[in-house]
Image (tube, rainbow, N blue to C red):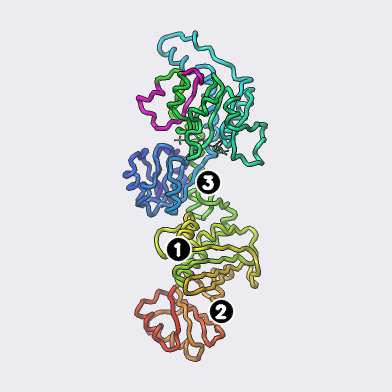
Amino acid sequence: MKVLACDGIHEDGLALFRDAGWEVVVSDPIKDTAVLAQALVGVDAVLVRSATKVPAEALAEASQLRVIGRAGAGVDTIDVEAATERGIAVMNAPDGNTLAAAEHAISLLFALARHIPRADAGMKAGEWPKAGLTGFELEGKKLGVIGLGRIGGTVARKAQGIGMEVAAHDPFLPASAAGKGSVPLKTLDELLAWADVVTLHIPRTKETTNLLSETSMRGMKKGAYLINAARGGLVDEAALLQLIEEGHIAGAALDTFVTEPLPADSALRANAKLILTPHLGASTSEAQQAVSTILARQIIDFVATGAVAGCVNLPPLTAEAARESGPWMPLMSSLGRLAARLVPAPTRLEITYAGRTDALDTRPLTRLLVAALLGTASGRVTPVNALQEAAARGLTVAETLGGDGDGFDRLLKLRVVGEKRTREIEATLHRGPRVVRLDGVEIEFDPQAHVLLLRNEDRPGMIGAVGSQLGAAGVNIVNFALGAAGDGQARAAITVDRPVNEQQLALLRATPGILSLAQV
Ligand SMILES: NC(=O)C1=CN([C@@H]2O[C@H](COP(=O)(O)OP(=O)(O)OC[C@H]3O[C@@H](n4cnc5c(N)ncnc54)[C@H](O)[C@@H]3O)[C@@H](O)[C@H]2O)C=CC1
Ligand SMILES: O=C(O)C(=O)COP(=O)(O)O
């Protein structure tokens, strides 16, 4: 396994990769998409912060890439949709830098209130700039938090600690979280009109871009302040400058910008009422150590066990649930390939998880099965894009939980419907991964092995005829399972020690009494 670490990822996370046997390649930020596309060839995982952007074009040649890891919170620099389409998991580690980002916002709050940067710059320039730098006290002032998630919630708590009155706007807060920690919620307009200082803590998405437009900022209280340590593009920078010049907004502190690094000639740099920091929110040694190690563990576990944590395009699967579902995973993949062999171009897949279903998270199992079923045909299908691909290719997937396990602790029943035929497969993990019934006929074989599936006339001499054909071809039979279908026909699953070549298959098919033969 090989991981490419761009953007100065903390060494502790890289050490975890090395300890797990991964090859680690360290790189400076890669700004050129074509160069990044080349760098991703032959790589299993890539780690980025905000400097290396990952657009769709960077993924064009990345056929081995399984994970894009964001050592931090915001994934707006990664084309998550394109990654999902290509079956690549996108992971982040938002819990690791919450405190750092919140403390930076609080630092900017104090810096704005007491003109710290201008005071410092004047002192360094040999002045005594006391006059003109009278500030204001924060205790008793109103702080409006937009986005009461991890960082916004932490900022709210800390601001309450210094005696500020705090309210928030967050339309997506789960009802269970709303009102917790006594932060009243307001509409955006109410909050903007109410707050002395507004601070943003939301992700940048299509919906939040330019949330603070000229119109909404005009709705802010005259003389209020604005802090954006969340993302460039949430605030209309030109409108902000204008409103500061007009005196409507008293000042602002920005850590994030539409274009990063901020161009040297940006008009923002020339305004004395603006405090600017170079995207420093997550830049503490503690946060960098945390995001790097959290992310490394998530990726290593995902690749090794299928456990899913911190993934923005796959449902979570705890290590415990992965242990429970884990033994089923190889079986799902081989059943998917078997189903694809039996029913080319399926239109409907019905999956029944029968028997004991407690503690079994079926989501990753279904995704694996569908990925294997579709992956044999074309393209790269993984659990990340399996359901999307199924919908795109006209395959309906239906899942049922519970029902009679037919004496097995857990029994998986598949019904695969194609245009010409429908096949049924039942499988368990009892005595190892096993198909136990095929089209209602009891017949047992390991779908992970090389198997010849036969339909033949149910008459004496068939086993001998097939056995001698295989013997003559030098193919060793590992297991010969037979089942009577009850219609004068029999089914056989012959497990062989190696694949049988086309010529040998043709000879077998020509054997009198053999009605059909498929190698899986
Ligand atoms: N400056 C820096 O270095 C850093 C910046 N960030 C930024 O902060 C953002 C927030 O991070 P977390 O708090 O960890 O995320 P989070 O997901 O815990 O919280 C985001 C909150 O915003 C809310 N939200 C979404 N759209 C909204 C809208 N239109 N109006 C109001 N609320 C809305 C969500 O409901 C959620 O509660 C990240 O997405 C990232 O862009 C994060 C870390 C460091
Ligand atoms: O985690 C985030 O969302 C951040 O914005 C931090 O960015 P960085 O990793 O410092 O480039």
Label 1 residue SS: helix
Residue at 48% from the left image edge and 85% from the top image edge? 456
Reading the image, the residue beneath label 1 is 374
Circle 2: residue type: Val
The tag earlier along the polypeptide, 3 or 2, is: 3
Magenta segment: does it hold 301? no
What segment is highlighted magenta in the picture?
Answer: 246-269
Label 2 residue SS: strand
Residue 219 location in percent, x, y? 55, 26
- What is the crowding at mark 3: few (fewer than 14 residues within 10 Å), some, or many (at least 20)? many
Q: CA distance from mark 2 to mark 1?
A: 25 Å
The tag earlier along the polypeptide, 1 or 3, is: 3
Reading the image, the residue beneath label 2 is 441
Front of the two marks 3 and 2 = 2
Front of the two marks 1 and 3 = 1
Reading the image, the residue beneath label 3 is 310
Say above or below: 380 vs 513.
Answer: above
Q: CA distance from mark 3 to mark 2?
A: 43 Å
Say above or below: 477 vs 390.
Answer: below
Residue furthest out toward the bottom = 460
